[in-house]
Amino acid sequence: MFQINENYLKLPGSYLFSNIAKKVAAYKEANQGAEVISLGIGDVTQPLAPAIIKRLHSAVDEMADAKTFKGYAPDLGYSFLREAIVQNDFKARGVELSVDEIFVSDGAKSDSGNIQEIFGVDNKIAVCDPVYPVYVDTNVMAGRTGAYNPQTERFENVIYMPCTKETGFAPELPSEAPDLIYLCFPNNPTGSTISKSQLQQWVDYANKVGACIIYDAAYEAYITEEDVAHTIYECEGAKTCAIELRSFSKNAGFTGTRLGYTVVPMDLKCKDVSLNALWARRHGTKFNGAPYIIQAAGAAVYTEEGKAQLKEQVGYYQNNAKTILMGLKDAGYTVSGGVNAPYIWLETPNGMTSWEFFDLLLEKANVVGTPGSGFGPSGEGYFRLTAFGTYENTLKAIERIKSI
Ligand code: MLT
């Protein structure tokens, strides 16, 4: 008789956003005609920018002509895109990387889930609490954690780094040295971030204890403050201790189109084994490359036209973030985030639990958000709203929240 991967049985319930989608669908079914506004999952609402659409169309036409048709993409990504990434996302910020250090993928969610595969199963992970659930769940699936403890709402054999109001929603260096450290700045879900010098402390720490940082920089386009690093490689020594995950979803609207990339520096080694070579081996074996038309569209992000249009698009969502932040403050809520990130983190009123507040908002305001406790026990009593809605719906949602 075959056996299953029993690690999956350690996972309580379903994936957070699937769970929320089911609840919302059930509510809509029971309340036909209810005009529900979703500020829950961080999914964009603005169409792809004209420069991207134009390139998408021309790339589709190329596929219709035998002379320009493309079959399998190079498994690590087309060099035109990897080159544009190196120049624009790194060189322009004073960071030298080579094209061979960039691995194009179908998005940061897959990369953030898959990257753990190149590490030993006995490695101990450290995660922020609250945390983007993919980091933890994929390590559970891989057998890198112990059982789930329903009392503590934590998995055994995982180092949790509480990010609370008291810590300014930033993690503190753990007392027990981890092997892998997941960091996401600007942060999902709290919308907070840390300064470049604070990030430098993490890099120094990782180099000192021999840990590898998995750095999720999916939200870097939302940084507005000067002393915040756009990439971990702005920190000295990061190339020997950090992998960076990047996305085209939040800066360019590719949530449905799927494109991302991972940086694995050549200098990142475990004894004399190169992690770059391991990830290349993994990518080559399990992935046939992001589609040509999508990579071509991705390269349009880095054209002058694309950059100008995306600055405006990110600005649109930043304005939503400000609208939510100010609106909720006016209404007496305690809120944070939203300045360097598209997420606003609010304290639930009157000691309500995160899920109680979720139900209240859904029923009384027809607004969907994400319960903080879904991201980990330190998120209990908090709630996340996203700035990725339309401006009109964002305004309407805030008005409705104010009136309950
Ligand atoms: C979120 O809402 O946390 C994100 O949209 C999830 C993701 O990017 O996969």
Image (cartoon, rainbow, N blue to C red):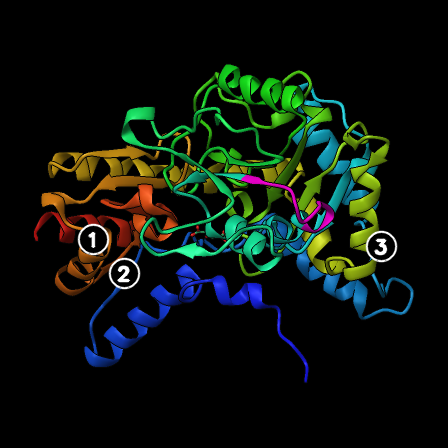
Q: Amino acid at mark 1?
A: Lys
Q: Is residue 378 visible?
A: yes
Q: Residue furthest right?
A: 67
Q: Nearer the viewer, residue 239 or 102?
A: 239
From the viewer's perspective, is residue 330 above or below residue 58?
Answer: above
- Bounds of the magenta segment: 117-125
Q: Quadrant of the N terminus?
A: bottom right
Q: Is residue 393 left or right of residue 239?
A: left
Q: Is residue 243 left or right of residue 272?
A: left
Please tell me the numbered disc located at residue 37. 2
Q: How many angstroms separate mark 2 from mark 1 (CA)?
A: 9 Å
Q: What residue is shown with label 1?
A: 396
Is residue 106 covered in magenta?
A: no
- Answer few, some or many: residues within 10 Å of disc 1's Cα (few below 14, many 20 plus, some between 14 and 19): some
Expressed as whole percent of the image width and height from the top left, the position of residue 142 reads 62, 57
From the viewer's perspective, is residue 35 above or below residue 170?
Answer: below
Could you tell me which secondary element the residue under label 3 belongs to? loop
- Answer few, some or many: residues within 10 Å of disc 2's Cα (few below 14, many 20 plus, some between 14 and 19): some
Q: Nearer the viewer, residue 179 or 288?
A: 179
Question: Disc 2 vs disc 1: Cβ atoms closer than 8 Å?
Answer: yes
Please tell me the numbered disc located at residue 74. 3
Measuring 73% from the left and 57% from the top, which residue is drawn there? Answer: 290
Q: Amino acid at mark 3?
A: Pro
Expressed as whole percent of the image width and height from the top left, the position of residue 26 reads 28, 76
Q: Amino acid at mark 2?
A: Ile
Expressed as whole percent of the image width and height from the top left, the position of residue 280 reads 82, 47
Q: Is mark 2 within 8 Å of ligand 1?
A: no
Q: Is residue 201 left or right of residue 337?
A: right
Q: Is residue 45 visible?
A: no
Measuring 62% from the left and 53% from the top, which residue is drawn there? Answer: 107
Main SS category, magenta section: loop
Q: Nearer the viewer, residue 298 or 138?
A: 138
